[in-house]
Amino acid sequence: MANRAFRRPDMLRPQAVAQTKVTAAPVARTTPLLDASGGEFLDRIFWFAMLACGLAVLGILVLIVYELVLRSGLSWHAFGFKFFVGRDWDPVNEQFAALPFVYGTLVSSLLALTIAVPLAVGVAVFTTEMCPRALRGPLSFFVELLAAIPSVIYGLWAIFVLVPILTRYVDPFLSKTLGWTGLFAGPSFGYSMFAAGIILAIMIIPIISSIAREVLMVVPQHQREAALALGATRWEMIRIGVLRNARAGIMGAIILGLGRALGETMAVTMVIGNRPEIAKSLLAPGYTMASVLANEFSEATGNVYLSALIEIGLALFLVTIVVNALARFLVWTVTRGQPARARA
């Protein structure tokens, strides 16, 4: 009995070994859903459909430029380059010049950048480098929520809240303290270039902040660690290790905000005063290229009048395209398609 109990496995009978073999299950044959020729045909259809989608966007852009150039030809032949350097805007006598609108667009946009850039970059640095984890998500959400508010809502808020505050408190104070500079001289009516700059600044803060935050998040972590290892403070680490490496991308974010400010229409139209003049004081009313299109396009009766407005639209369109392309290039020089780093 003992010998049988301790028999080695190699001493088993061949019949027992044969019974322990596992037979492979037969492989079920599957048929392809489509044959090779049918799959290639669908691939070609899909390729042509995607190509059509891409070309449709370019086609729309070409059509817009073509129509603007065609419709503005009458004004171009009538005024030439003087259209952008003259100051007279007289629809009654059919004398048109776009310099007051160009001036108002540039001044209001640059004023908006002056106010918005420090706030937007500060928000971006705080959310990426210093904000607690529990607060980072809600703060980013509410900042980006500002970009989803319609511009007419900003205009209504500016009429009922911002303009009365400027008329009663801010403009008199600035006129008293900084009136000697000429930038805040003259009477205050609330509806001014200064009010337009403030409302534009509020509208472009979420754009600059969101893009700057994404740029800061792709800065390599070892840049921060190296600065801290050398004994830098947190401010020195952010200034040297983060902001210096992200300066081109931040500049791109600023230019994108500038592009939004250049083309903003409704909110600016409601608070800028809509007067085609060039004034040094920011408390004086002004006009922008987008505002004149919104206000006077439906009232244009003569062909030259309508052509002059379309030429202003063409100039605004080309400036916006150039500004946005430059901003995209500057952002790409920093990110180069890299994903944002994960934050702990």
Image (cartoon, helix red, strand yellow):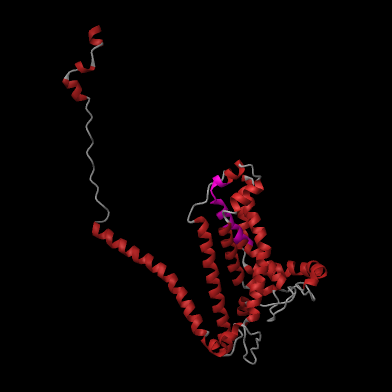
Residue 16 percent location from the top left of the image: 19, 21
Residue placed farthest to the top in the image? 1
Relative depth, front residue between 77 and 204: 77
Question: Magenta region, mostly helix, strand or loop?
Answer: helix
Q: Is 28 part of what is drawn in magenta?
A: no
The quadrant holding residue 195 is bottom right
Q: Is 212 part of what is drawn in magenta?
A: yes
The boundaries of the magenta stretch are: 205-223
Residue placed farthest to the bottom in the image? 93
Please tell me whether residue 242 is drawn above or below residue 47 in the rendered image. above
Determine the residue positioned at 59% across, 49% down: 241
Relative depth, front residue between 188 and 278: 278
Determine the residue positioned at 82% across, 67% down: 177
Please tell me whether residue 339 is drawn above or below residue 116 in the rendered image. above
Residue placed farthest to the right in the image? 176
Determine the residue positioned at 74% across, 76% down: 284
Please tell me whether residue 306 is drawn above or below residue 28 in the rendered image. below
Residue 6 percent location from the top left of the image: 25, 11
Please tell me whether residue 200 is drawn above or below residue 238 in the rendered image. below
Determine the residue positioned at 54% across, 79% down: 314
The quadrant holding residue 1 is top left
Report the side of 253 relative to 53 (left or right).
right
The quadrant holding residue 227 is top right
